[in-house]
Image (cartoon, rainbow, N blue to C red):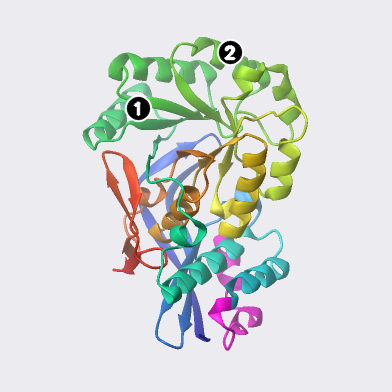
């Protein structure tokens, strides 16, 4: 089945509310979209939303890359060779994971629709469903507790709390959340590289007994060796995020003493499902758990992340709430959230529909 057309466009979308992390505040997001149309009318959809501060690629770059002659040359190629097209795209756009991801996701979607099965089924779905965390940005205590109550009312059971600006305030927010909500919420923390090793030790010591699930990327990229000052048990709680961009980084971080016990995989860091599976396979062989995350993204790429996450037996955590932050989207469906648990459907491809 031949590809007869490819299309791409850039769209700025407002967020439902601004949020703050350790190094920025966001009120809207630009998303790049990519379409692959087959001769029988099937259209596969992809989306790119790279974080420039993490991977060095802007969404505008993504959108421009998707309009190049290389992409136009997909026309006339056979969708059954989608993995070869992804390989060629990685060679053409090295170190541009947003571009790679948009292409990868659209081709997977088109291929799944063509053969009539979901992408998760194509790779073999190992996990039925998991609860996602929902994210609270860096806020004062009153706002933090109010947002947590809103999430409780919506049925969510896991919070991911952004930290990294003031360790004393971070400790107070976690302690107060546990006091206010008891065992209703499991709590994860994301410091976004905001701590020193001293800050991290202080935070971990002060929150012992608070049953934190994990601490995501507590220190800056390049300081991974300092984490070896912590005990093995303490490092098992740490999740690599910005330190983990591709399978090469996954292999390096899995060698000898491991600074992280958990790998956070984002399609927008590693270039889509192919890169994600490369990381996942290394992690599985190194007995490292998987934690699937996201940026502010369309349902398109969030659903793609869910499909590949559920195809990996070592997936333990998901944090795929990025599309919930968008005030608008181009598609609907793909997944359903029930009491905080994310369920995918078995519709061919990724199972979403244009609005």
Q: Dot 2 corresponds to which residue?
A: 202
Q: Position of residue 111 (x, y in %)?
A: 49, 73
Element on which disc 2 rests:
helix
Q: Which residue is at a point 68% across and 66% down the rendered structure image? A: 90
Q: Quadrant of residue 156?
A: top left
Quadrant, the C terminus: bottom left
74 or 151: nearer the eye? 74
Q: Position of residue 137 (x, y in %)?
A: 42, 35
Relative to 130, does residue 56 appear above or below in the rendering? Answer: below
Going from N to C along the chain, the mark reached first, 1 or 2, is: 1
Q: Residue at x 44, y 59 (%)?
A: 121
Q: Which residue is mark 1?
A: 144
Viewer-nearest of labels 1 and 2? 2
Report the side of 228 relative to 352 (left or right).
Answer: right
Residue 79 in the image: x percent, y percent? Answer: 54, 79
Q: Element type at marker 1?
A: helix
**Seen in the image, is 331 located left or right of residue 217?**
left
Magenta segment, which residues? 58-80
Q: How many marks?
A: 2
Name which residue lies at 71% across and 36% down: 254
Residue 243 appears anywhere in the view: no
Does residue 233 sit above or below 48 in this rendering? above
Question: Taking 179 as reference, is 1 above or below it?
Answer: below
Examine the rendering and report whether any part of residue 42 can be seen: yes
Asked if the magenta segment contains residue 62, the reply would be yes
Name the residue at 55% across, 16% down. 203
Q: Are marks 1 and 2 in contact (CB under 8 Å)?
A: no
The reply, left or right, for residue 269 in relation to residue 145 is right
Residue at the extreme left of the image, as rendered: 153
The percent coordinates of residue 126 (x first, y second) are 46, 48
Task: Please tell me the numbered disc located at residue 80.
Answer: none
């Amino acid at each position: 089945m031949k590809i007869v057309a490819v299309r791409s466009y850039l769209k700025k979308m407002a967020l439902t509310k601004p949020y703050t992390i350790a190094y920025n505040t966001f009120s809207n997001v630009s998303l790049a979209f990519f379409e692959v149309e087959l001769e029988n009318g099937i259209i596969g959809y992809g989306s790119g939303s790279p974080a420039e501060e993490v991977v060095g690629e802007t969404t505008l770059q993504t959108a421009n890359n998707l309009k190049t002659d290389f992409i136009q040359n997909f026309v006339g190629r056979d969708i059954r060779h989608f993995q070869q097209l992804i390989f060629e795209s990685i060679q053409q756009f090295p170190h541009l994971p947003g571009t790679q991801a948009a292409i990868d996701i659209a081709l997977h979607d088109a291929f799944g629709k063509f053969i009539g099965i979901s992408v998760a089924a194509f790779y073999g779905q190992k996990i039925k469903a998991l609860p996602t965390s929902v994210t609270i940005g860096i806020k004062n205590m009153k706002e933090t507790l109010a947002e947590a109550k809103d999430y409780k009312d919506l049925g969510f059971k896991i919070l991911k709390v952004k930290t990294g600006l003031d360790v004393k305030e971070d400790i107070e927010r976690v302690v107060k959340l546990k006091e206010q909500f008891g065992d209703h919420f499991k709590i994860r923390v994301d410091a976004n590289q905001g701590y020193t090793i001293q800050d991290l030790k202080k935070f971990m010591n002060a929150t012992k007994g608070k049953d934190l699930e994990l601490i995501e990327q507590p220190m800056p990229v390049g300081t991974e060796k300092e984490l070896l000052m912590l005990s093995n048990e303490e490092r098992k709680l740490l999740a690599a995020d910005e330190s983990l961009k591709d399978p090469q980084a996954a292999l390096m971080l899995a060698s000898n003493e491991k600074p992280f016990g958990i790998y956070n995989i984002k399609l927008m860091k590693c270039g889509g499902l192919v890169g994600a599976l490369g990381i996942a396979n290394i992690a599985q062989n190194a007995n490292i758990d998987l934690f699937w995350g996201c940026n502010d993204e369309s349902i398109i790429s969030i659903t793609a992340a869910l499909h590949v996450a559920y195809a990996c037996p070592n997936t333990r955590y998901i944090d795929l709430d990025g599309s919930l932050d968008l005030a608008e989207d181009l598609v609907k469906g793909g997944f359903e959230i029930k009491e905080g648990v994310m369920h995918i459907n078995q519709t061919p491809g990724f199972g979403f529909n244009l609005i």
